[in-house]
Image: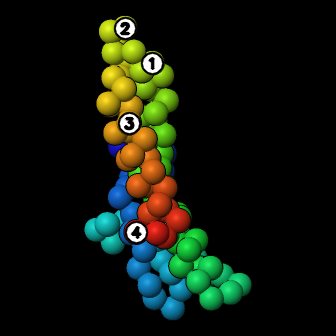
Amino acid sequence: MNTETTKHTPGPWKVKPESRFSVRTEDECACVADCYGTHSGEAEANAILIAAAPKLLEVLNEILHADNIDAESGGVSPQEWNALMLKASRIADKAKGKL
């Protein structure tokens, strides 16, 4: 992710279970969020969703820049588009805690 154009803590982020679920940078130098919940599993689900935010933003930007699927006019090919949709689907599954 291009950190020159963003103000948020650069990813990747990961969930670290403690007394609450903490979202931290991969090197654990920064805490991005501490998550709590009102019922079992909610805090962890919130943390997983927050931790996926950098990848979700990355794939959303890729989709927005692939606005033309006609490769002949400078856009992405149908195969590249399908690969991008598969990537988006996998990241969304991870954000929902399915992976």
Q: CB atoms at circles 2 and 4 under 8 Å apart?
A: no
Residue 37 occupies quadrant: bottom right
Name the amino acid type tagged 3. Asn
Residue 78 occupies quadrant: top left
Residue 41 occupies quadrant: bottom right
* Label 1 SS: loop
For the residues marked 2 and 4, what is the alpha-carbon distance in whole angstroms? 36 Å
For the residues marked 2 and 3, what is the alpha-carbon distance in whole angstroms? 18 Å
Q: Name the residue under label 1.
A: 68
Q: Name the residue under label 2.
A: 73
Q: Which of marks 3 and 4 is nearer the N terminus?
A: 3
Who is closer to the viewer here, 7 or 17? 17
- Position of residue 39 in the picture relative to residue 57 (left or right): right
Q: Earlier in the sequence, mark 1 or mark 4?
A: 1
Q: Earlier in the sequence, mark 2 or mark 4?
A: 2
Name the amino acid type tagged 4. Leu
Residue at the far right in the pictured view: 38
Q: Which of marks 2 and 3 is nearer the N terminus?
A: 2
Which residue is drawn at the image coordinates 28% and 68% (left, top)? 27
Name the amino acid type tagged 2. Ser
For the residues marked 1 and 3, what is the alpha-carbon distance in whole angstroms? 13 Å
* Label 3 SS: helix
Q: Mark 3 points at which residue?
A: 82
Q: Is residue 66 above or below residue 90?
A: above
Q: Name the residue under label 4.
A: 99
For the residues marked 2 and 1, what is the alpha-carbon distance in whole angstroms? 8 Å
Residue at the far bottom in the pictured view: 19
Q: In this view, does 81 lie above or below 46?
A: above
Of circles 2 and 3, the one toward us is 3
Q: CB atoms at circles 2 and 3 under 8 Å apart?
A: no
Q: CB atoms at circles 2 and 1 under 8 Å apart?
A: yes
